[in-house]
Amino acid sequence: MPAVGLGTFGSDNYSAAQAVRGAAAAGYRHFDCASVYGNEKEVGDALQDVMAGGMGRGELWITSKVWNDRHGDGEVIASCRQSLADLRLEYLDLFLVHWPFPNSHGKGVDAHSRDPHARPYVHDEYMRVWRQMEQLMDLGLVRHIGTSNMTIPKLTLLLRDAKIKPAANEMELHPHFQQPELFTFVKENGVVPIGYSPIGSPSRPERDKMPDDTVDIEDPVIVEIAQRHGVHPAVVCLLWATQRGQVPIPFSVKPSQYVATLQSVASDALTDEEMAAIAGIDQNNRLIKGHVFLWRDGQTWEDLWDVNGEIVQ
């Protein structure tokens, strides 16, 4: 898996296809997609252009994900086949279960919206999803399977029961939300941590924004290190991520940004002292909170994340 990827979430406001074409020309080979982003056909057209320009399929790493409303029997495989058709590919390098809940939501809903059929994590149900993920590998439609937005208690059960272990776990990771326990857990179990929102998430949905949220790229420690290296603070966040051992997947449509990111990550490095300084600014500030996936009245978003070390029912 390439050490840095380009996310494709955000197409409501930007052209993911334009970003994919430009980023591939700049040197990116890793593109993170999902059916729920609603732009896989557009991204697929861009990937065809990239390969028509001489890049072999084997040089690319393409990820997609099954959305929450496709967890039923047979639906995971159907969802993967649809993503392959939209992306115009014969296989995916990585296919993820986007969220561990079957709870979905409408487009653009606020934090108070709830799926009337929402329910908590049920491990037997999740394993029926995972068995279909394993079938995808048997069918040759995907090279690797993995998880996203999981917690240690949920991953512990999956690792116990899976025939094919998850190759990666996609999770929110940035200097103000380092998730050290989960990060260590996945690494120790041979699972690659992929970090979304690696510079914070200024374009996240309004429903996830709260007054006490912090801004990573404005942190004095990040700003000082950036000034020392002569780079934007966002680049420092990405340097920290790659040196820590996670795969960041930032989203950018501006060539100046994604070119600078790739050049800096490939050529620059933070010192041990700088890495230690960033380790000290963790605020435990989750930005993608997930309110819309809650299943009963009176809950807070923390229930989605098993903060007390047990799966909340």
Image (cartoon, grey):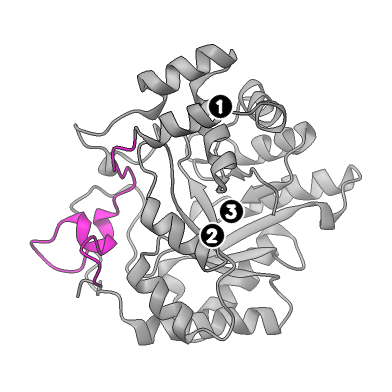
Residue, disc 2 = 35
Q: Amino acid at mark 2?
A: Ser
Q: Residue at x 36, y 23 (%)?
A: 219
Closer to us: 41 or 218: 218
| Closer mark to the observer between disc 2 and disc 3 | 3
| Closer mark to the observer between disc 1 and disc 2 | 1
Q: Residue at x 64, y 64 (%)?
A: 94
Where residue 164 appears, as percent x and y from the top left, is 59, 81
Calculate the distance from the C-alpha at mark 2 to the C-alpha at mark 3: 7 Å
Calculate the distance from the C-alpha at mark 1 to the C-alpha at mark 2: 28 Å
Q: Is residue 237 left or right of residue 61?
A: left
Image: magenta residue range: 282-310
Q: Is residue 92 visible?
A: yes
Where residue 112 appears, as percent x and y from the top left, is 18, 52
Asked if the stretch drawn in magenta spans residue 290, the answer is yes
Residue, disc 1 = 235
